Amino acid sequence: MTQHKVATHEEWQAARDELLAQEKELTRRNDELARQRRELPWVAVEKEYRFETTAGTKSLAELFDGRPQLLIYHFMFGPEYKAGCPVCSSIADNLDANRPHLAARDVTMICSSRAALDKLQGYRGRMGWSFDWVSTVGPDFNRDLGLLHTEEELKPYLEGEISPGVRQNASACGTDVARYVAEGPGLSVYIQSDGAVYRTYVTSARGLEPAMGYYGLLDRTPIGRNEQRDELFWLRRHDEYEPAGPAATS
């Protein structure tokens, strides 16, 4: 027998209408934040970053692929990793599906990692993705965005209590915790204008949730995300889940 509150349809509708008003207010707030995000000042990218691609070494400007806007997802796949981060892999699943829709609005979407290009291409083939995936030449690109950390910088974290989920993901990547958390996920956005490249936006951590479509759907289910810090993390690569079967709800 369920322990959750049960109501009549009329009571449910009244509660739903009250929540709907708050959802609409949040939507309007998100629209306003999107407007402010678009109005952020641009920063000229003056450093000559280089990237290894399947078509040879390219500059940041050459990654735009003929479109004026570039969106880069910084995928956690360090040089010592054996496989890509499972969480980043779940995000890449969502990004790959949206790539043609972004292109229709003049946005090129790619992924970037520090692992060797052949590793990235092999993993991309395993996952069945079609987006372009580049390997950074040197650490500067990630470091300048705050997405690459030294062991000295991570020392306080590494000397503390490491959550089981972090250990689990490090093991899934075939590396240790220090090398795993040295990499950081992120999203950076660029525009080309008058022959120059400008950085317009960078985010990480929970700022990446718009690219994690499953969370928005889980937030609308009765049980929700159901994540506990002291438990092993539930996310897996899409080819690693056990076959789904009927589950008890009582």
Image: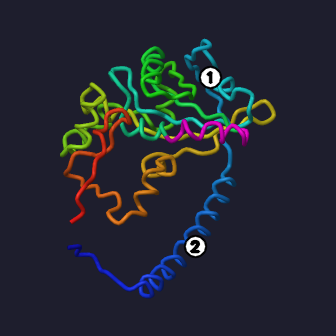
Mark 2 lies on residue: 24
The quarter holding residue 107 reads top right
Residue at coordinates 45% horizontally, 87% vertically from top-left? 10
Dot 2 falls on a residue whose secondary structure is helix
Residue at coordinates 45% horizontally, 57% vertically from top-left? 217
* Residue 71 is a magenta residue: no
Mark 2 nearby-residue class (10 Å; few <14, some 14–19, many ≥20): few
Residue at coordinates 46% horizontally, 38% vertically from top-left? 146
Query: On the picture, is 113 further left or further right than 238?
Result: right
Mark 1 lies on residue: 48
74 w.r.t. 232: above or below: above
The boundaries of the magenta stretch are 94-106
Seen as rendered, the residue at the extreme top is 56
Mark 1 nearby-residue class (10 Å; few <14, some 14–19, many ≥20): few
Mark 2 or mark 1, which has the lower sequence index?
2
Residue at coordinates 64% horizontally, 44% vertically from top-left? 200
> Could you tell me residue 216's position as x and y percent?
46, 57
